[in-house]
Each structure stands twice: as C-alpha cells, then as structure tokens.
Amino acid sequence: MEGHARLGRTTATTTAIALAAFGVVLAVGTGLALAFDYVSVLELGALWALIAAGLSLYTDPPGERRLGRAALWAAAALLFGGLPIIVLAWRVAKRRTPVYEPNVSR
C-alpha cells in the first residue's frame, strides 16, 4: 500500500511542477503580449529551454552537475515545448518524494 501512496505523492508533485512551469510560460507570454503586442514561438521556446535546463540540473546530485545533459534537455524543450518538462517534472518529483520504510527503527 505504501507504493500507491508514494505514487500518489509523486504524481501530485509532478502535476504541481508541470503546472508551475506552464504558468510561468503563460504569464511571461501574456506579459510580452501586453507590453509589445507580439509573442514569438521562439521567445516562448527559450523559456521552455531555461526551465528544462534548470529542472535537469536540479535532478543531478549536488556534486555532479551535468551541463551537457541540461543542454540536451534545453534543446529538446526548444524543439518540443512543454513535453520534456513533464518528463523532467516526474524525475524531480521522484527525487523529492521520500521513500517510506515501515520496518526501520530509529
């Protein structure tokens, strides 16, 4: 039963991260539209790339940041928009969700 609870927490965290990323892109796109009456797909793609690079760097262990992997995720987000963000959000959620071990005594 613990596996189902962890899956539920991971799914909820993934959804929250993905919605936050989509919200940031939507807010910046709206701000650009209101300020300049123009929004480019390339501008929004650059935002997706920055978010993807940040999430990729976050999933790496602190002493082992992989800039090449972050660059590849950024390129994927530039090409495919928000789809890579969902995969990265799942990786971040799995990292953040604690594993429940009922038989471990403290």
Image (cartoon, rainbow, N blue to C red):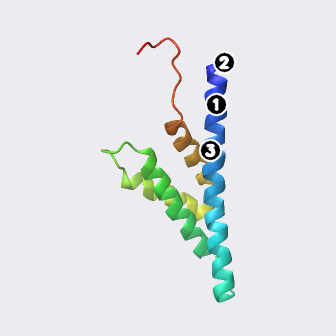
Residue type for callout 1? Leu
Position of residue 95 relative to residue 47, above or below, is above
Quarter holding the C terminus is: top left
Position of residue 37 relative to residue 66, above or below, is below
**Which residue matches tag 3?**
14
Residue type for callout 2? Met
Dot 3: within a 10 Å radius of its alpha carbon, few (fewer than 14), some, or many (20 or more) residues?
Answer: many
| Residue that protrudes farthest toward the bottom in the picture | 36
- Counting from the top left corner in percent of width and height, residue 90 is at 58, 42
- Please tell me which residue lies in front, 12 or 56: 12
Q: Are marks 3 and 1 in contact (CB under 8 Å)?
A: no
| Residue that protrudes farthest toward the left in the picture | 63
Query: Residue 93 is drawn in which quadrant?
Result: top right
**Which residue matches tag 2?**
1
- What numbered label is drawn on residue 39? none
Task: Describe the element under mark 2 as helix, strand or loop.
Answer: loop
Give me the residue at 37% from left, 42% from top.
61
The mark total stands at 3
Dot 2: within a 10 Å radius of its alpha carbon, few (fewer than 14), some, or many (20 or more) residues?
Answer: few
Precedes in sequence: disc 3 or disc 1:
1
Position of residue 31 relative to residue 58, above or below, is below
Query: Residue 80 is drawn in which quadrant?
Result: bottom right
- Counting from the top left corner in percent of width and height, residue 9 is at 63, 35
Give me the residue at 66% from left, 47% from top.
15
- Counting from the top left corner in percent of width and height, residue 100 is at 53, 23
Give me the residue at 44% from left, 59% from top.
71
- What numbered label is drawn on residue 7? 1
Task: Describe the element under mark 1 as helix, strand or loop.
Answer: helix
- Please tell me which residue lies in front, 49 or 3: 3
Precedes in sequence: disc 2 or disc 1:
2
Residue type for callout 3? Thr
